[in-house]
């Protein structure tokens, strides 16, 4: 019987007894937070991880512990990737294709959250362009390197519940910019991308899924006021207490990275393919409720296959490539 994990499960618990020798895994965003721990946990169990980061010097320093944790055939190498520049994304993809070394798992972990309004090098709203379009081009360009039986894990968030994607005004040209609305759009896009990618690739044995890692204090919150997270927890717990619910606690980075590695190398492919996961299991609750840090749930628009196909077509239009 498969072991059941939950919100407090950490990476080592999820990967206990797993030998990942011979597995090649690409992880984006390995210079901070969840990306570092995801890479560390995987190489500690024998995987060879290719870690992508915008700032290679920062990533080199940040991943020294991960490098030291490598066992057996495990190891970590770094490649340069700036998801806010399609030129950088294409260059990274071309370099990987030239090497021709296949991957068993791709974890699209990198991202930005609730930043001030800005544009990528290609003129896309920064959060949508970085979190979705950059990964959209990277994954599609190197899809031929994904082995049969491989998986793609897209890091989404419960923040997808802030907003559906807006395919008519993706860059806030006519809509007043709200940082968390923009974040919600990008995180919904991550789920919809996984839904459509899974539909397109499952016949060849590749499955795609989206995960919410939980609420964790990492560099992702760099654009928030210093007291924003503490205020969020305080207000959430006051609301939860009023409704007779238990208090909320932040996840540790080890707990946050657990759902990524669970979905990537532990869970059954048919269980997670085309689905949204949190707390190391597939989310079954479809909800219209406001975001609640305790309650799980996925918005119906995030799993809508027609919406996923429409986003794919819009994304191809925006990046000027057909996949």
Image (cartoon, rainbow, N blue to C red):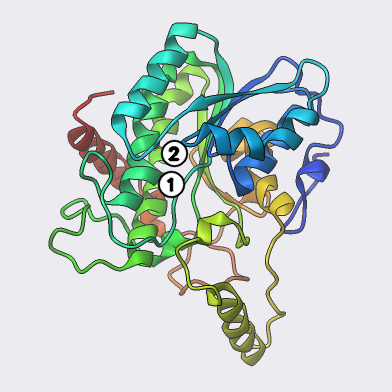
Q: Is residue 229 visible?
A: yes
Give the x, y percent position of residue 66: 73, 34
Q: Can residue 30 be seen in this view?
A: no
* Spatial separation of the CA atoms under disc 2 and disc 1: 5 Å
Residue under pointer 1: 191
Give the x, y percent position of residue 240: 63, 84
Give the x, y percent position of residue 281: 66, 49
Q: Which of 98 and 281 is in front in this view?
A: 98
Residue under pointer 2: 194
Residues at discs 2 and 1 in contact (Cβ within 8 Å): yes
Quadrant that contains the C terminus: top left
What residue is drawn where x is 53% and y is 32%?
A: 56
Q: In this view, does 22 lie to the left or right of 203?
A: right
What residue is drawn where x is 81% and y is 42%?
A: 12
Neighbours of disc 2 within 10 Å: few (<14), some (14-19), many (20+): many
Q: Nearer the viewer, residue 115 or 241?
A: 115
* Above or below, comparing residue 318 to residue 43 in the picture: below
Quadrant that contains the N terminus: top right
Question: Which quadrant of the view contains residue 69?
Answer: top right
Q: Is residue 318 left or right of residue 111?
A: left
What residue is drawn where x is 23% and y is 33%?
A: 319
Neighbours of disc 1 within 10 Å: few (<14), some (14-19), many (20+): many
């Amino acid at each position: 019987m498969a072991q059941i994990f939950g919100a407090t499960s950490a990476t080592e618990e999820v990967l206990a007894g797993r030998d990942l020798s011979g597995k090649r895994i690409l992880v984006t965003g390995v210079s901070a937070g969840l990306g570092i721990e995801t890479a560390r946990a995987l190489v500690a169990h024998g995987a060879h991880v290719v870690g992508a980061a915008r700032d290679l010097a920062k990533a080199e320093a940040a991943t020294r512990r991960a490098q030291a944790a490598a066992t057996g055939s495990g190891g970590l190498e770094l490649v340069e990737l700036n998801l806010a520049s399609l030129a950088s994304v294409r260059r990274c993809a071309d370099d990987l294709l030239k090497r021709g070394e296949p991957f068993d798992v791709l974890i699209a972990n990198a991202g930005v959250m609730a930043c001030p309004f800005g544009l990528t090098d290609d003129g896309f709203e920064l959060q949508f362009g970085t979190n979705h379009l950059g990964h959209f081009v990277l994954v599609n360009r190197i899809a031929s390197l994904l082995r049969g039986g491989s998986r793609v894990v897209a890091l989404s968030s419960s923040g997808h519940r802030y907003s559906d994607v807006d395919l008519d005004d993706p860059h806030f040209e006519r809509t007043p910019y709200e940082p968390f609305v923009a974040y919600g759009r990008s995180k919904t896009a991550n789920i919809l991308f996984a839904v459509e990618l899974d539909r397109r690739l499952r016949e060849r044995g590749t499955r795609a899924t989206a995960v919410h890692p939980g609420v964790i204090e990492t560099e992702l919150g760099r654009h928030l006021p210093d007291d924003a997270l503490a205020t969020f927890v305080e207000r959430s717990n006051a609301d939860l207490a009023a409704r007779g619910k238990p208090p909320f606690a932040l996840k540790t980075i080890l707990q946050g990275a657990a759902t990524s590695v669970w979905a990537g190398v532990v869970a059954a492919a048919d269980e997670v393919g085309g689905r949204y996961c949190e707390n190391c299991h597939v989310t079954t609750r479809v909800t219209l409720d406001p975001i609640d840090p305790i309650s799980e749930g996925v918005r119906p628009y995030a799993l809508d296959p027609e919406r996923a196909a429409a986003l794919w077509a819009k994304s191809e239009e925006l990046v000027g490539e057909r996949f």
